Amino acid sequence: MALAVSVHAEINANGSAILYWTDDIGIFSATRRLSRDGDPTQPALDTHLTDKGASMVFDPQLTLSNSFVNSLGTLQLDLMGQGYIFSEDPRFNQGMFRLQAVQSFSRDTRLRLRYSLVPDQFLGENEDHRLDQSGLADERLSSHIWSVRMERAITEQLEVKLLGRYGLRRYNEAFAQRDTNFFTVGPHLDWRISPGVMLGLGYHYERGLADGRTKPELEDDVSYVNHYVTAELDIELIDRLSLLMAAHYERNNWTSGIPGDERNGGHENIVQGEMILVRQLSEHVRVFGGVQRSSRKESFDTNSVKNTNIGIGLSGSF
């Protein structure tokens, strides 16, 4: 901010409103955030936290932005707020806030900084591992994530991005052994194959260390090594009508070495696909609808956990 020499006083606003139907309240948030631009490595989801029934979900989002010209180029600041509001179980209602700064050094080079916060997210009722307790207890979580991404256009058709991020997941007292610090590194690539076709690719490596690794008596260490691979395809079918498709794969290798911990030697595979049809109504307004399907399978569980989300929405800028 000390480098700013002039300000574009006009604040730009972008908003959207999406209505979803989900067949599993407990896993909806994790499915929605599994993208290269989201938070693909969500908290560990035990059997008690899934299969919580269907619900309608309202997803409002608003982003306010302004730009500053400085000696390095142009700095854009964004403040975004988003919510998930469930019709069936309001305990799962949650908000997400993001502050972003994008410094453009030239037309081809940008530095993107972000801080994201999801406070006091209710995950469900889960098994209480504390030695003086038994039964189920509310599991709640606050996530703090800082990320940096260097973006560079190699040609007019090809752009590469290098991502690094650091995060904290902090749980309520009943699940404090799951408090996790993690870091992520990985490349992204955007390739404009033709004027109407864009391909996006990404890979993340992530390492997470939980407090449970130092508390063997609780037998609940959710430390992990994660590999995440994604591909996204954006096709302009006709003028003002586009089809967006994406496929994601994630592998969690649990690193617990505690005897009696069900994650000792275990792993998790996640496969997810989505398809969205987008209609541009005007320069500033578009409507869209789509479907998302995911499947999660823990090596120590007999059955996989599946989730389907169907949504329709409207977005605009003003």
Image: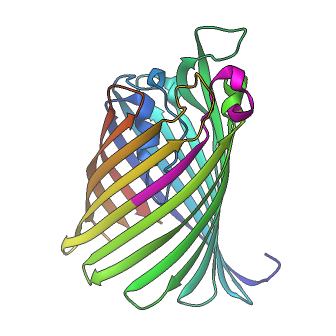
**In the picture shown, does residue 230 fall above or below 189?**
above
- State the image coordinates of residue 243 (x, y, percent, origin top left): 23, 64
**In the picture shown, does residue 28 fall above or below 46?**
below
User: As drawn, is 27 to the left or to the right of 262?
Assistant: left
Residue 90 visible in the picture: yes
Residue 224 in the magenta stretch? The answer is yes
- Of residues 14 and 268, the one drawn nearer to the viewer in this rendering: 268
Q: Quadrant of residue 113?
A: bottom right
Residue 312 in the magenta stretch? The answer is no
- State the image coordinates of residue 244 (x, y, percent, origin top left): 28, 62
Q: How is the image coloured?
A: rainbow
Numbered disc total: 0
Residue at position x 66%, y 38% in the image: 142
Residue at position x 38%, y 60% in the image: 230
User: As drawn, is 220 to the left or to the right of 310?
Assistant: right
Quarter occupied by the N terminus: bottom right
Residue at position x 58%, y 21% in the image: 260
Residue 283 visible in the picture: no
What segment is highlighted magenta in the picture?
212-229
- Of residues 121 and 133, the one drawn nearer to the viewer in this rendering: 133
- State the image coordinates of residue 75 (x, y, percent, origin top left): 66, 78
User: As drawn, is 53 to the left or to the right of 3?
Assistant: left
Residue with the most extreme left position: 238
Residue at position x 52%, y 47% in the image: 41
Q: Quadrant of residue 293?
A: top left
- State the image coordinates of residue 82 (x, y, percent, origin top left): 53, 47
**In the picture shown, does residue 238 fall above or below 64?**
below
- Of residues 219 and 1, the one drawn nearer to the viewer in this rendering: 219
**In the picture shown, does residue 100 fall above or below 222?**
below
Residue with the most extreme right position: 2
